[in-house]
Amino acid sequence: MLTPFQIFRDAVNKISPIGEKDWQLCEPGLGFKSLTKSTFFVEEGKVYREIGFVVKGLLRSYYLAHGEEINTAFYVEGQWPKAYHSFLTQTASRQWIQALEDVELITISYKHLQYLFANSPAWERFARIATENLYIASQLRSEMLLLEKPAERYINLTKTHPHLLERVPLYHLASYIGIRQPSLSRIRKRLAKINTTV
């Protein structure tokens, strides 16, 4: 069985291969963090000083706007929960990242990442590719909310992230696709009727 650090290493190498010498630069700065369900990895008003990699568990990212929680992302095994603006600017976060299950994370600090970027072209290349991937994902989400009807958003979610349907409560999924839970329930009932008549 792979250790958490081996899982992290494999995930990084899939994005951009890192040589052994560059891994030796990285390893002293890696940490391990456990979160129990409902606790927070990032809190509004606090500076996000470390980036995380999910070894086990599930988290959600959300904003609190006018008393309403608006979900913007879910992070499962192999993904990177992040409050990017807070991390890059080292200023207070406006978002929350909460564990929806018990979570295990590999962490690396802002300070150590800056050290890696200054001393390793391989790690700088990794960061560039990871940032490009983040931008693509962000644009796809914006297009989804702007261009797709609610039913389309839900159908696409079931196709692209079917695992979330089993692990995330419906009210969180509804918020993520930009609607309220009663609307999502109606969409699910309508789709179920269509499927049973086909």
Image (cartoon, rainbow, N blue to C red):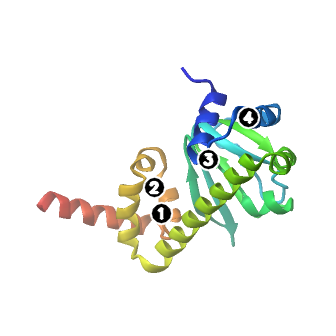
Q: Is 133 placed left or right of 51 in the picture?
A: left
Which residue is tagged 3? 16
Q: Nearer the viewer, mark 3 or mark 2?
A: 3
- Disc 4, SS: helix
- Count of residue discs: 4
Q: Is 138 placed left or right of 193 in the picture?
A: right
The C terminus appears in which quarter of the rendering? bottom left
Q: Amino acid at mark 1?
A: Ala
At label 3, counting other C-alpha atoms closer than 10 Å, the crowd grade (few under 14, some 14-19, many 20 or more) is: some
Give the percent coordinates (x, y) of residue 168.
Answer: 49, 49
- Disc 2, SS: helix
At label 4, counting other C-alpha atoms closer than 10 Å, the crowd grade (few under 14, some 14-19, many 20 or more) is: some
Query: 178 or 18, which lies in front?
Result: 18
Which residue is tagged 1? 174
Which residue is tagged 4? 23
Are circles 2 and 1 on residues that touch, CB within 8 Å?
Answer: yes
Calculate the distance from the C-alpha at mark 2 to the C-alpha at mark 1. Answer: 6 Å
Calculate the distance from the C-alpha at mark 3 to the C-alpha at mark 2. Answer: 35 Å
Mark 3 or mark 2: name the one nearer the start of the chain: 3
Calculate the distance from the C-alpha at mark 2 to the C-alpha at mark 4. Answer: 40 Å
Q: Write the residue at 80% across / 60% down.
A: 88
Query: 127 or 168, which lies in front?
Result: 127
Q: Amino acid at mark 4?
A: Trp
Give the percent coordinates (x, y) of residue 181.
Answer: 45, 63
Q: Amino acid at mark 2?
A: Leu
